[in-house]
Image (tube, grey):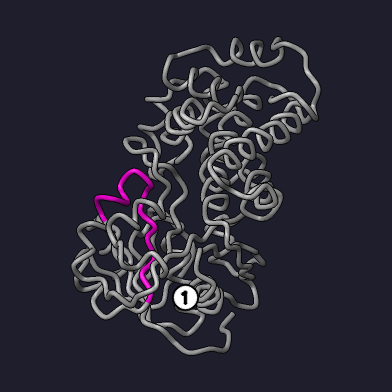
């Protein structure tokens, strides 16, 4: 898995499944890696057992990956800082990290979500904290289950940045013989694709929980892509981005893959479980649950019709029965696929 190229000092902020997998990948690529976790139990487990049993069980981690609960110890001197906290906590965590971040470091956002309070994408959150490093920021996204990346299964993702130099630098640092990295200048589209697909995956899970079959799944994925694309274009993204890895690629994976937390949450909703009960039993975060109200608000702000996301918002925030939501989707006014808004 190791590939050629100069080694960098990398700090990964967030030791959930994805952060741990990226730390593992960077180490195998020959970089010096330090990993930060808010949870003392995770720090102790990795140090004592060489494994993140809470979030990435079954993947041996090298003792050369230094893990700590102190941001200063992890970040100081890092040439690459990877932000992988849950989306709603990125602003808080990275504000605490800011005093220790080298102003020349490349900042990579690997969290997929939209901040509810401000409706900002993750790169926008980071840009407000690190205004002088806007040209050093990269969004990493695409169809990538953490466990498969950590086990070296072939994966392709996208590194997006307004800066050609920054996205090529991230491509060089992350790519390996099993982790292919494409570049894209469209940060808006790449981030929106990664965030909004989680809400559509919740809907795909709901349909499965209700007992519906592949016809329904195919319709949800296709019309979900149309919704994501409409909002993305209204916000300044490029249509082509949504037909690439960060768009349709990630959408299909998250809507159909059995490892998808968002799909699993949706399935239980469709089976009649309450969202509070579902979340109380989860270790990891299902980003779509928090992204749904943000996506709903963005649709209203940009006057974009998003019927699937609107119904998921109603299920999650207003307690609408899932079967009723599906019926409303199916009974909407007829229209042309090519010309109608939804």
Quadrant in which residue 328 is drawn: top right
Q: Is residue 29 left or right of residue 64?
A: right
Q: Position of residue 155 (x, y in %)?
A: 64, 64
Q: Is residue 109 left or right of residue 5?
A: left
Q: Does residue 87 show up magenta in the picture?
A: yes
Q: Position of residue 8 (x, y in %)?
A: 41, 83
Of residue 147 and residue 182, the one placed in the foreground of this image is: 182
Quadrant of the rendering where the C terminus is positioned: top right
Of residue 281 and residue 69, the one placed in the foreground of this image is: 69
Of residue 197 and residue 68, the one placed in the foreground of this image is: 197
Q: Which residues are magenta?
A: 80-93
Q: Is residue 276 above or below residue 27?
A: above
Q: Position of residue 171 (x, y in %)?
A: 56, 74
Q: Which residue is mark 1?
A: 26
Q: Is residue 261 above or below residue 9?
A: above
Q: Say which residue appears at 58% left-offset and 85% top-offset.
A: 3
Q: Say which residue appears at 53% left-offset and 26% top-offset.
A: 303
Q: Does residue 202 show up magenta in the picture?
A: no
Quadrant in which residue 223 is drawn: top right
Quadrant of the rendering where the N terminus is positioned: bottom right
Q: Secondary structure at mark 1?
A: helix
Q: Say which residue appears at 54% left-offset and 72% top-offset.
A: 164
Q: Say which residue appears at 77% left-offset and 31% top-offset.
A: 214
């Amino acid at each position: 898995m190791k590939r050629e190229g100069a080694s960098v000092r990398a700090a990964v902020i967030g030791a959930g499944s994805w952060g741990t997998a990226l730390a593992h990948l960077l180490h195998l690529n020959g970089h010096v890696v330090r990993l930060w976790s808010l949870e003392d139990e995770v720090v102790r487990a990795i140090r004592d057992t060489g494994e993140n049993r809470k979030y990435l069980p079954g993947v041996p981690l090298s003792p050369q990956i230094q893990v700590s609960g102190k941001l200063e110890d992890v970040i100081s001197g890092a040439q690459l800082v990877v932000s992988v906290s849950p989306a709603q906590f990125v602003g808080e965590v990275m504000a605490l990290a800011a005093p220790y971040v080298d102003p020349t470091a490349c900042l990579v956002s690997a969290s997929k979500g939209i901040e509810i309070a401000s409706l900002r994408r993750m790169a926008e959150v980071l840009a407000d904290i690190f205004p002088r490093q806007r040209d050093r920021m990269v969004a990493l996204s695409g169809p990538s289950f953490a466990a498969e990346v950590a086990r070296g299964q072939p994966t392709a993702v996208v590194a997006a940045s307004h800066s050609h130099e920054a996205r090529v630098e991230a491509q060089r640092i992350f790519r390996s013989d099993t982790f292919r990295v494409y570049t894209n200048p469209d940060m808006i589209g790449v981030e929106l694709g990664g965030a909004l697909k989680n809400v559509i995956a919740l809907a795909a899970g709901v349909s499965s929980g209700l007992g519906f079959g592949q016809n329904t799944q195919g319709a949800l994925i296709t019309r979900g892509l149309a919704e994501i694309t409409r909002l993305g274009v209204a916000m300044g993204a490029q249509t082509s981005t949504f037909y690439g890895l960060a768009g349709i690629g990630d959408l299909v994976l998250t809507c159909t893959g059995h490892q998808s937390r968002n799909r699993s949450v949706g399935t239980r909703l469709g089976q009649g479980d309450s969202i509070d009960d579902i979340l109380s039993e989860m270790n990891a975060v299902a980003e779509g649950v928090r992204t749904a109200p943000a996506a709903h608000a963005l649709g209203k702000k940009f006057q974009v019709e998003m019927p699937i996301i609107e119904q998921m918002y109603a299920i999650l925030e207003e307690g609408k029965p899932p079967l009723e939501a599906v019926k409303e989707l199916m009974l909407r006014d007829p229209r042309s696929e090519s010309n109608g808004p939804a």
